[in-house]
Each structure stands twice: as structure tokens, then as C-alpha cells.
């Protein structure tokens, strides 16, 4: 018999009844039922119930064991007594009657229990991460992570990609975040950097003549933590392709991501074909370039209904600035004053003056509830029979049963208010409850983010978000440049190394003084978004040195700056570079979505805390004077106090 086990704790079934088994694992839970001890023994594979009664030679040892002790159990497999089976466990029909127990690893008093799923402070969970990882939910998440990575790797290879590994010790490169620097012992005063991403290396792989590259790449950035971003390090599905258009990248990546979400999405619907949403449309409809498409709300420009109207606040904003607009946020089912007041209070809590609103409520002198239901039923019947015109005639009677309420409606007038209702398609849900809409006014670039947050708030509070799906999309047509108000100059908007979405000759002939045309340019850049979370940014790369020099010159950077910071890449591109492009979806975020978690720490083995500290291993830590001398480093620490 094996020294530790003949079976795992998830293996025994009714077919094993009568056999002798040896199990090893952790004491998950111990129960005393009238002198008979029940030990739920747990290992990586599952859980088996062990029974020890006073007649067993193992009983004296069993009395001493406690939660999370590691033990070896010998015993006979038998059926559980009728009525005590556990259908939720694969081993739930059997138990092991213990004849011998050996303590392999006693455990001291636990700082946090493993049994159950209680919430514990982050510092305790991270300091004792090895205990936290024994808990069922977290253990399951980590195993899911490995399965997802296996699936991504397999699907990439099926798409014709080959896996490469790029360097970890490299040169510092401005990628938008701070580098982690590594001092060189052999080259005093010089430093390596950990890669923020393998961006330059994967482009060099394309220049080297390889065609389709990928890797599950570790990336290192010295930036603050967020729920959807780990401090210090993260992993991404990094890929690059040669001789491709933007659509070629989409055609290669979309089946991989769709397949992974279908495989591990627990039956949730997955967008069958990811829509392409221009950046400008995303900002106008959703107030974000990371829209959550599970939320059906689309904002609309209703400026013309307020221009010259009796609602003087908005009318004066529109009259005073040609760039000003009024946007409406429809709220189906929000037709009551209590909800509108809550939204108004929320807006003030967000630092705004408030939210204008209109809501529609049932007229007190209208049809009875019973008659409203009959009317709704008749409309629905006509719609189902395709008799659209007749249904619309009855809708007119339906609309008559509601009145528009609120200061906006009062000052705007019934005709303009009705025009807004028609434009937004409100009060057509046939629920018997009225709808509402909220308004924001000013320059869209100033209020779009707030409007997007309001859209999200309305969708969440009214239960409009369809959480039984993964809604993916591509955001495309990002602006190549933007106006830097602080420095009063044109600057890059997103990624300076993307190809402009313009014929090369036309771009090279651009007059740098033609600011209107330059600010209207688009880049061949794209993001992939799922449920309001950005999974990745990508682009068709600028592979032409002449185009790159022109692009940087437009933003006010001379060739000397380009040569100093990116000389190696420029040399490579000048010696025959293919058109190429790629993207790098975040593995951690994909796993977080598929595990149904809201924080990356729940899907990472050994994460850091919000202050980028590893509480388990004690990093970052001080080093010895000897180590510093070897590296020719002298500390210049900030003064305390």
C-alpha cells in the first residue's frame, strides 16, 4: 500500500464499498455526534466523510485532531446510513470507517477558518494566503484560471500562432507607467527594467520574419492598484501578426475570446459577433469608451428641443456656446418622483448641481388598472400578429393615460416634451408604469463621463442590466491626436505608434498648421470591451520610419527625441518591416469576469495589497549593506516626519 494514499478524497464511490482505502488530507470539519466523530477529510480533489467510533483503535488520535491538521486515514469503505447521503458531494453516498489514523502535520490555532466563506480583512487574507487558497471558492478560481489559460493557448495554436518568450530584463521604455528598475552589478550606475509589456519585442519578432506570435506574457508596471488592475504585475494574452489589416486581427482574436467565454461562461450568452462601435459613437451613446452593453440605455442628443425653449437654464447654455449640447438618459420604469429625487441626490453626491428630469405618471382621471391591462393585451396581440399600424393607433390611447411631470416638463411645454418622449421611445413598455428621462447640459467633453456614470446608475437601480450574458464589442476609430489645453498644442490622443487611418502619401503631405484636419484624424487603434471592462487595447503598428517621424513632428517632437528613446526600433523598421498589428487581452480580467468576481485579487495566486506590498513574503524588503555595495548603490531616503 502507498505510504500516503490509495485514493484521493474525491475518488471513492459506491463501487468501492467493502474495499480498504488509505486517504491523506486536511481535517476540513470535525463533528461529535454522541461520542462518534465525523471528520470531513479534504484534499485538492474533493472531500470524504470519515467516521471514528470509540471501538476503533484510531479513536484516541481522532479525539486530538483539530481543523486543518493533516492526517493519514486507513479504513473500510461503506455505504452511508439511509437518509444521511449527501447528493451535493461526488463521494456523498459513502464514508470511510477509520481503523488507523496518523498525524502528518498538526496545525496551530488558525488566524482565519478555512471552512465556510466568511469575509476577513484583506491584510489577514494576504498574510495567510496559503490558508485563503485552501478555501473552496478561491481554490476553484485558481483552477479555473489554469483551465482558461490552457484553452487560450490551445485556441491560439489552432489559429496558427506560435508561442515565443521575450526577455524579462530589458531597457527602460516609456509605456505610460513607471518602470520597475533592476540595478546592474556588472555595469555600475546602469539599470535594467522589467517590461511593462513585450511591445517592442513582439514588433521586432515580426520584423525578424516570423508571422504569428503569442505568449501568456508577464507585465510589470509600478502603478497604483484598482479592483480591475493588480499593482506590480499582471498577465496578458500578447499577440502580433504580420501582413494584416485591422479586420484580420479581429477575425483571429474574436473566435478565441468568444470560445473561451462560451466554454467557461456557465451557460451565459456570449455576443455571437462583436459589434464595431466608433469611439465617438461610444462616447455619445454611453458616455464611455468602455460601454457595458448589457445595459440597454442609449443616451441621445435632445438639444433642439431645448434651444430657445422656456427652460431657461438649458436654453441659455445652448445659446452661449456653440459646442454645448443637451443629452437625455432614458429611464424605462423610472416614472416616479421618489426615483427621480434619488437620482438627483446621487448627482449632487458626485459633485454636480443635480439632474434635470421628466417623468411620466398615470393620470388620476384615466383608465382603471383593469382597463389598462386590457388595452396593453390588445396592443401586444396586434404586435404579435404584425398589425403594426393598428397597434400604433391603440398606443395613442395608451399615451393619453400618462402625464409628464417635473419642472423641466412644466417650463418646456407639452409639445416639446412630447417630441422628447417620441424621440426616446418612452412609455411603450406596456407595464402600466411610466418612464422617466434625465438631462445633462454643457460641453460633451466636460460632462460625458458623468453622463456615462448616470446611465450606469439608472440601469443598475432599475434592474435593466441583463447579467445573464457576456456582452463584447470592439471600440474603433480612436482620434490620432487631441488638443492639449494645458500646453496649447496638438498631442497624441492614445498610442503614438499606431498607423494613421489615412493613405501614407496623404499623411506625409499634411500641413502641420492644418489643425482642424489633424484633430479630425483617426488612428487604426481598437479596444475590446466586455461588460464595461476594457480587456485590451491594440493597433495596426506604424511600421514606416518616415510616417513615424511625421507623426511625432506633428505632436512637436523632433527626430532627436525619437532617436534617443526608440532608436533600436527605428533602425529595425528602416531595414524592411512588414505591415503588422496586434493586441493583448488581459488574462487576469478575463478570469475575473468568468469567475464572477469583482476584484482581481480573487483570481490571482499571490497578489499584493493596495500599497503594492506582499504581506506573505514581506516584499518589498530592506537589503543588506553588502548587497548595496555590490550594486554600487547608496540610499537617499526621504526624511521622516
Image (cartoon, rainbow, N blue to C red):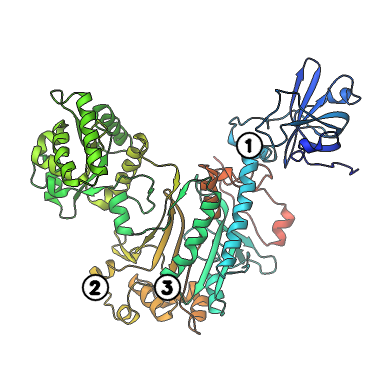
Whole-percent x, y for residue 487 in the image: 31, 61
Q: Which quadrant does the C terminus fall into?
A: top right
- Bin the neighbour count of mark 1 within 10 Å (Cα to Cα): few under 14, some 14-19, many 20 and up: some
- Bin the neighbour count of mark 2 within 10 Å (Cα to Cα): few under 14, some 14-19, many 20 and up: few
Question: What separation in Å lies between label 2 and label 1 (alpha carbons)?
Answer: 57 Å
Looking at the rendered structure, which numbered label has been put on residue 474?
none
In the rendered image, which residue does mark 1 sit on? Answer: 125
Q: Quadrant of residue 504?
A: bottom left
Number of on-image labels = 3
Viewer-nearest of discs 3 and 1: 3
The secondary structure type at the circle numbered 2 is loop
Q: Which quadrant does the N terminus fall into?
A: top right
Question: What separation in Å lies between label 3 and label 2 (alpha carbons)?
Answer: 28 Å
Q: Is residue 49 above or below residue 497?
A: above
Q: Is residue 480 above or below residue 60?
A: below
Whole-percent x, y for residue 25 in the image: 78, 37
**Is 356 placed left or right of 215 in the picture?**
left
Whole-percent x, y for residue 608 in the image: 60, 45
Whole-percent x, y for residue 449 in the image: 32, 48
Viewer-nearest of discs 2 and 1: 1
In the rendered image, which residue does mark 2 sit on? Answer: 514
The secondary structure type at the circle numbered 1 is helix
Q: Quadrant of residue 345?
A: top left
**Is 545 placed left or right of 208 in the picture?**
left
Question: What separation in Å lies between label 3 and label 1 (alpha carbons)?
Answer: 46 Å
Asked whether residue 291 is in view, the answer is yes
**Is 270 placed left or right of 312 in the picture?**
right
Looking at the rendered structure, which numbered label has been put on residue 245?
3
Q: Nearer the viewer, residue 14 or 570?
A: 14
Amino acid at each position: 500500500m502507498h505510504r500516503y494514499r490509495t485514493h484521493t478524497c474525491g475518488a471513492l464511490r459506491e463501487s468501492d464499498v467493502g474495499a480498504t482505502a488509505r486517504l491523506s488530507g486536511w481535517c476540513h470539519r470535525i463533528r461529535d455526534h454522541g461520542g462518534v466523530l465525523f471528520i470531513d477529510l479534504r484534499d485538492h480533489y474533493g472531500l470524504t466523510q470519515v467516521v471514528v467510533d470509540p471501538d476503533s483503535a484510531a479513536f484516541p488520535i481522532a479525539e486530538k485532531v483539530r481543523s486543518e491538521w493533516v492526517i493519514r486515514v486507513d479504513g473500510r469503505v461503506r455505504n452511508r446510513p439511509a437518509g444521511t447521503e449527501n447528493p451535493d458531494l461526488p463521494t456523498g453516498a459513502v464514508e470511510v470507517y477509520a481503523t488507523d489514523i496518523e498525524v502528518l502535520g498538526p496545525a496551530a490555532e488558525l488566524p482565519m477558518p478555512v471552512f465556510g466563506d466568511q469575509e476577513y480583512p484583506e491584510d489577514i487574507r494576504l498574510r495567510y494566503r496559503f490558508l485563503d487558497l485552501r478555501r473552496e471558492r478561491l481554490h476553484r478560481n485558481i483552477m479555473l484560471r489554469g483551465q482558461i489559460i490552457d484553452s487560450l493557448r490551445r485556441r491560439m495554436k489552432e489559429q496558427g500562432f506560435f508561442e515565443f518568450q521575450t526577455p524579462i530584463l530589458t531597457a527602460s521604455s516609456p509605456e505610460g507607467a513607471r518602470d520597475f528598475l533592476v540595478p546592474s552589478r556588472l555595469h555600475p550606475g546602469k539599470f535594467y527594467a522589467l517590461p511593462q509589456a513585450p511591445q517592442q519585442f513582439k514588433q521586432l519578432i515580426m520584423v525578424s520574419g516570423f508571422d504569428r506570435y503569442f505568449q501568456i506574457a508577464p507585465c510589470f508596471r509600478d502603478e497604483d492598484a484598482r479592483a480591475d488592475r493588480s499593482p506590480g504585475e499582471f498577465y496578458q494574452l500578447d499577440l502580433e501578426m504580420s501582413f494584416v489589416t485591422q479586420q484580420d486581427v479581429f477575425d483571429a482574436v474574436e473566435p478565441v475570446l468568444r470560445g473561451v467565454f462560451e466554454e467557461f461562461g456557465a451557460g451565459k450568452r456570449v455576443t455571437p459577433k462583436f459589434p464595431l462601435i466608433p469611439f465617438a459613437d461610444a462616447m455619445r451613446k454611453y458616455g464611455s469608451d468602455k460601454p457595458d452593453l448589457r445595459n440597454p440605455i442609449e443616451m441621445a442628443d435632445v438639444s433642439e428641443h431645448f434651444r430657445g425653449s422656456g427652460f431657461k437654464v438649458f436654453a441659455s447654455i445652448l445659446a452661449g456656446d456653440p459646442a454645448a449640447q443637451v443629452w437625455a438618459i432614458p429611464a424605462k420604469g423610472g416614472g416616479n418622483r421618489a426615483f427621480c429625487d434619488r437620482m438627483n441626490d446621487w448627482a449632487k453626491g458626485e459633485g454636480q448641481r443635480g439632474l434635470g428630469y421628466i417623468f411620466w405618471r398615470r393620470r388620476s382621471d384615466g383608465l382603471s388598472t383593469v382597463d389598462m391591462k386590457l388595452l396593453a393585451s390588445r396592443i401586444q396581440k396586434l404586435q404579435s400578429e404584425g398589425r403594426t399600424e393598428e397597434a400604433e393607433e391603440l398606443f395613442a390611447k395608451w399615451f393619453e393615460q400618462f402625464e409628464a411631470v417635473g419642472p423641466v416638463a412644466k417650463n418646456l411645454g407639452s409639445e416639446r416634451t412630447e417630441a422628447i418622449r417620441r424621440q426616446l421611445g418612452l412609455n411603450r413598455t406596456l407595464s402600466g408604469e411610466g418612464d422617466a428621462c434625465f438631462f445633462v447640459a454643457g460641453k460633451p467633453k466636460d460632462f460625458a463621463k458623468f453622463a456615462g456614470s448616470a446611465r450606469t446608475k439608472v440601469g443598475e437601480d432599475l434592474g435593466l442590466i441583463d447579467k445573464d450574458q457576456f456582452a463584447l464589442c470592439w471600440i474603433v476609430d480612436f482620434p490620432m491626436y487631441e488638443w492639449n489645453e494645458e500646453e496649447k498644442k496638438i498631442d497624441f490622443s492614445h498610442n503614438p505608434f499606431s498607423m494613421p487611418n489615412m493613405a501614407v502619401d496623404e499623411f506625409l503631405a499634411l500641413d502641420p498648421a492644418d489643425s482642424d484636419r489633424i484633430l479630425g484624424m483617426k488612428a487604426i487603434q481598437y479596444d475590446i470591451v466586455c461588460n464595461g471592462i476594457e480587456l485590451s487595447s491594440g493597433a495596426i503598428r506604424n511600421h514606416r520610419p518616415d510616417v513615424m517621424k511625421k507623426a511625432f513632428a506633428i505632436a512637436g517632437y523632433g527626430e532627436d527625441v525619437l532617436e534617443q528613446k526608440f532608436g533600436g526600433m527605428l533602425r529595425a523598421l528602416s531595414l524592411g518591416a512588414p505591415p503588422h498589428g496586434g493586441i493583448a487581452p488581459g488574462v487576469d480580467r478575463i478570469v475575473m469576469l468568468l469567475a464572477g468576481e469583482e476584484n482581481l485579487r480573487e483570481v490571482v495566486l499571490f497578489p499584493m495589497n493596495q500599497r503594492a506590498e506582499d504581506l506573505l513574503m514581506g516584499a518589498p524588503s530592506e537589503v543588506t549593506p553588502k548587497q548595496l555595495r555590490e550594486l554600487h548603490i547608496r540610499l537617499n531616503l526621504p526624511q521622516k516626519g
